[in-house]
Image (cartoon, helix red, strand yellow):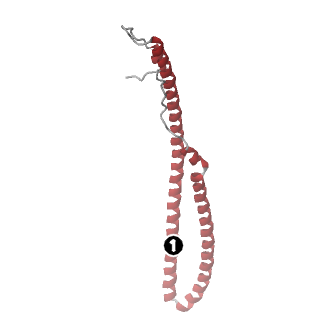
Amino acid sequence: MVPLTPLDIHNKEFNKGFRGYDEDEVNEFLDQVIKDYEMVIRDKKELESKIAEMNEKLSHFTNIEETLNKSILIAQETAEDVKRNAQKEAKLIIKEAEKNADRIINESLAKSRKIAIEIEELKKQSKVFRNRFKMLIEAQLDMLTNDDWEHLMEYNVEPAFAEVDEK
């Protein structure tokens, strides 16, 4: 069954019967019903528009979340790779040192200086990465805590009921 439109209500004709209702009262009531029904339809369209807008924003934030999750995974994988590579390199240095004690001691000292510099550089890079990552997360947190969210929470969805004057 197709829902009524305000025009359907307006055009509705009632048969007159013996001792029927007061025609003016019925017409007045129908006019009020039409006004209220039009308001409900307007409100419904407004709410549908707001829902579409909210869904679009939700989709945007979901994309941001997915991007952040991928970035975190890449960062974790990179950290594990760096750790594994450092461990492999350390094992190679130890094996070489055991085989060629005198020669390797001098080479090891030189390498250890180089590694210390690289570690310091990696520390600096990790601090930079950490700060950038922190700024990215804080920016995302700012997006989540900005007034737009509060504004969204202010939308009240209440059905519109009209008061009918009793006569």
Q: What residue type is labelled 1?
A: Lys
- Image quadrant assignment for residue 121: bottom right
Mark 1 sits on what residue? Answer: 83
Q: Nearer the viewer, residue 89 or 12?
A: 12
Q: Quadrant of residue 124?
A: bottom right
Question: Residue 132: x and y, percent?
Answer: 62, 62
Q: Residue furthest front?
A: 167
Number of other residues with Cα within 10 Å of mark 1, as a class: few under 14, some 14 to 19, many 20 or more = few
Residue at left 39%, top 8%? 16
Q: Image point 43% across, 21% down: which residue?
A: 4
Q: Where is residue 127 in the image (x, y as percent from the top left)?
A: 61, 69
What is the quadrant of residue 153 in the picture? top right
The vertical placement of 32 against 144, above or below, is: above
Residue shown at the point (43%, 14%) measured from the top left: 12
In the displayed structure, 11 sits above or below 125; it is: above
Pick the front one: 154 or 77: 154
Q: Residue at x 53, y 37 (%)?
A: 50
